[in-house]
């Protein structure tokens, strides 16, 4: 009997040892899941979600053809380009307001999506289950997803979809739920995040709320909206146009935007002619100098279109927030007693804690990379239009604080010296929050990353590769330095 008991115990112990060994081997085989977080407009919005009447909200009011065929709008808009007809701005703003309200894009006064609106593709399963999203993609976030799937395996890559209009702190809570679900599903202890544009702000809100959860392996920020954009200064009535700058910008966009694929659009605008564009600039500057007209523009057009969308407010540059709130509340555009104000004020504080938060997670073992592009001047509608941008987000903000020369200029004096200065003397990365973890690419636009290119492969390898995310290790592994430039095919080389 005693021998049988010993034999039984031996068998049980052997089984336990085999099981444990298998478990350990299995655990080693688990890849860290990668979650891609898209930016503003990254997935479709729907009305009547979950019902038989579910329908995509189409153009969000950004339908050029729709505007050009709207007689109420065009009857006054064409006068902007003539110097012998007086524009009736009341009529123009009223017509534009009626047009944009039909987009159904705006949130309510508390910054919530209208009832029945939202997304229909919240996924907690990997992209191997959602091949239609990425298999034929060639550009932007879906193109990045395809590259990730090719490099890392689609079963290990996830897409975090969300209603991009809403408060990013709310979105961070949804991201937390997805991360918990993915960890439970895969057995992984940590995940890696790659956030594009507004997705970077979502990541910022996530680490602000959950940095102590110890569930992050890598954070890769791609042209992130972590500190806002200067074009949002429009909310503080900083509207300024210059004919030369506008014409230069349109000409540059013919080849720069989307690799030149939208050249026809910018050529068509340019075909209006230098003189007529100049007249339009003069007319719009009259609006800019008239606070009553500016107020009507914001209240009649912008307010009903996007005025209550938290995410747009959360793209205001941190330093401009108070001035924008003051101006917009003064004209009745923003109600400081509303739920919307409470949300954007709370996120403003998150913005202010970014530097502290990102240093905290890095100190606690998270690999961090921040990638910012430059080489395109700002949209020529504010006093900050000479900033270097990626066509949308200012390089100084996307990089977490780089010192950047004005477009067409170079840094001088002490600012142009040191190991973190770009060879073209445009950027000094020493003032970045993480200078040793920040990279810059010239002539690469915002999230216009194309599948199969060197630029896209680099950011994907950063999030799912084995390289340490610092300047020295990346240079040794891939050959790329802190400052790079992209050609027309998004091939990249060191500057």
Image (cartoon, rainbow, N blue to C red):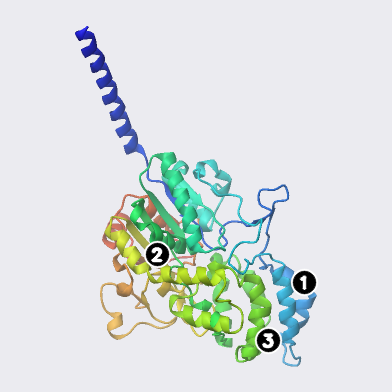
Give left or right: position of 208 versus 253.
left
- Residue of label 3: 276
As drawn, the label of residue 371 is 2
Where residue 52 sits in the image (x, y, percent)? Answer: 72, 47
Where residue 215 sits in the image (x, y, percent)? Answer: 36, 50
Residue placed most toward the observer, 432 or 304? 304
Instruction: Looking at the image, tell me whether mark 3 or mark 1 is earlier in sequence order.
Output: 1
Number of disc labels: 3
- Residue of label 1: 69
Q: Which of the 4 image quarters holds residue 113?
A: bottom right
Give left or right: position of 444 versus 239.
left
Where residue 358 sits in the image (x, y, percent)? Answer: 34, 63
Q: CA distance from mark 2 to mark 1?
A: 40 Å
Q: CA distance from mark 2 to mark 3?
A: 39 Å
Q: Residue at x 49, y 67 (%)?
A: 445
Q: Residue at x 26, y 61 (%)?
A: 472
In this rendering, the label closer to the viewer, 2 or 3: 2
Q: Note whether residue 141 is visible.
A: yes
The secondary element bearing badge 1 is classed as loop
The secondary element bearing badge 2 is classed as strand
Q: Which of the 4 image quarters holds residue 302?
A: bottom right
**From this viewpoint, which residue is outermost toward the top?**
1
Above or below, 116 against 167 in this view is: above
Q: Note whether residue 422 is visible.
A: no
């Amino acid at each position: 009997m005693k021998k049988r008991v010993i034999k039984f115990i031996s068998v049980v112990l052997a089984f336990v040892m085999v099981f444990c060994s298998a478990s350990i081997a299995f655990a080693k085989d688990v890849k860290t899941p990668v979650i891609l977080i898209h930016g503003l407009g990254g997935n479709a919005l729907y009305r009547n979600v979950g019902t038989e009447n579910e329908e995509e909200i189409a153009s969000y009011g950004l339908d050029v053809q729709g505007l050009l065929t709207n007689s109420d709008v065009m009857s006054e808009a064409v006068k902007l380009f003539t110097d012998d007809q007086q524009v009736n701005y009341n009529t123009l703003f009223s017509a534009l307001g009626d047009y944009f309200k039909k987009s159904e894009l705006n949130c309510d006064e508390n910054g919530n999506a209208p009832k029945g609106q939202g997304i229909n593709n919240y996924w907690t399963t990997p992209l191997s289950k959602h091949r239609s999203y990425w298999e034929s993609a060639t550009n932007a976030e879906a193109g990045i997803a395809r590259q990730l799937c090719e490099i890392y395996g689609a079963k290990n890559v996830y897409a975090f979809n969300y209603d991009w209009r809403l408060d990013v702190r709310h979105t961070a809570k949804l991201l937390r739920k997805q991360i918990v679900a993915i960890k439970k599903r895969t057995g992984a202890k940590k995940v890696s995040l790659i956030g594009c544009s507004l997705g970077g702000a979502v990541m910022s809100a996530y680490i602000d709320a959950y940095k102590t959860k110890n569930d992050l392996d890598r954070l890769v920020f791609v042209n992130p909206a972590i500190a806002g954009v200067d074009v949002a200064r429009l909310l503080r009535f900083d509207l300024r146009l210059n004919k030369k700058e506008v014409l230069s910008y349109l000409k540059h966009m013919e080849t720069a935007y989307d690799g030149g694929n939208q050249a026809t659009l910018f050529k068509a605008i340019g075909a209006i002619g230098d003189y007529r564009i100049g007249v339009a600039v003069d007319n719009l500057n009259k609006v800019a100098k008239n606070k009553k007209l500016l107020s009507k523009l914001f209240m009649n057009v912008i307010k009903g279109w996007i005025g209550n969308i938290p995410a747009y407010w959360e793209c205001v540059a941190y330093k401009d927030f108070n001035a924008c709130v003051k101006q917009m509340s003064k004209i009745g555009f923003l109600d400081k007693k509303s739920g919307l104000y409470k949300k954007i004020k709370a996120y403003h504080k998150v913005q202010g804690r970014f530097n502290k938060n990102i240093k905290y997670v890095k100190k606690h073992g998270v690999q961090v990379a921040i990638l910012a592009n430059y080489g395109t001047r700002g949209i020529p509608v504010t006093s900050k239009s000479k900033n270097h941008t990626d066509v949308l987000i200012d390089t100084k903000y996307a990089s977490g604080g780089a010192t950047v020369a004005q477009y067409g200029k170079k840094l001088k004096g002490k600012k142009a010296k040191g190991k973190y200065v770009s060879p073209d003397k445009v950027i000094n990365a020493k003032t970045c929050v993480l200078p040793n973890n920040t990279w810059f690419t010239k002539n690469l636009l915002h999230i216009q990353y194309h599948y199969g290119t060197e630029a896209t492969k680099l950011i994907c390898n950063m999030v799912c590769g084995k390289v340490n995310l610092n300047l020295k290790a990346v240079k040794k592994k891939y050959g790329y330095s802190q400052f790079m430039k992209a050609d027309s095919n998004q091939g990249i080389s060191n500057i």
